[in-house]
Image (cartoon, grey):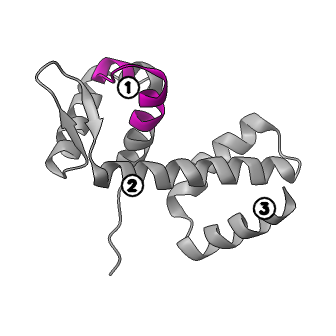
Amino acid sequence: MKKKYNESAEDYLETILMLSKKLPVVRSVDIATEMDFKKSSVSVAMKNLREKGHITVTDAGYIYLTDSGKEIADMIYERHDVLTHYLMSLGVPEAIAAEDACKIEHIISKESFQAIKNTYSKKS
């Protein structure tokens, strides 16, 4: 059976990746603000991600992706980006395309995503 990551964990890892590109350091409060979640919910999620080895948290509370966390975050981010642009190329408004991509990115098979990616990259 394939290892299945939970959608919430994938969203957190993707958010950490995106925040790390625009902030000098990422903290729980930044994640809570970005995702519009309670800080207590983010703290529980960070504990789970740390226990799974996907993030490290410094004594100062700075959050960093580990290699495994970055691998998952990069995969989800790529899926989100490709699917959003693909849907937009079909005429879907950007806001709706991004929202739908956020749902699809977690459940689409590697094979289906690769087919969309291949088709889309030939068009653009």
Q: Which residue range is magenta in the image?
A: 15-30
Mark 1 vs mark 2, CA separation in Å = 19 Å
The overriding secondary structure of the stretch rendered in magenta is helix
Residue type, label 1: Ile
For label 1, the SS is: helix
Which residue is label 3 attached to?
A: 120
Nearer the camera: disc 3 or disc 1: 3
In the structure shown, which secondary structural element does the residue marked by tag 3 occupy?
helix
Residue type, mark 3 in image: Tyr
Total marks shown come to 3
- Say which quadrant the N terminus sits in: bottom left
Q: Residue shown at 54%/71% (left/top)?
A: 110
Tell me the residue at 25%/48% (across/down). 54
Q: Residues within 10 Å of mark 2 (few under 14, many from 20)?
A: some
Camera-side residue: 65 or 89? Answer: 65
Residue marked by disc 1:
31
Q: Report the amino acid beneath label 2.
A: Glu
Q: Quadrant of the C terminus?
A: bottom right
Q: Provide the residue designation for mark 2.
A: 71
Residue located at (29% from left, 30% from top): 42
Helix, strand or loop at label 2? It is: helix
> Marks 2 and 1: in contact by CB < 8 Å?
no
Above or below, 4 against 64 in this view is below
Q: Of residues 18 and 8, which is closer to you in this image?
A: 18
Determine if residue 7 is in view: no
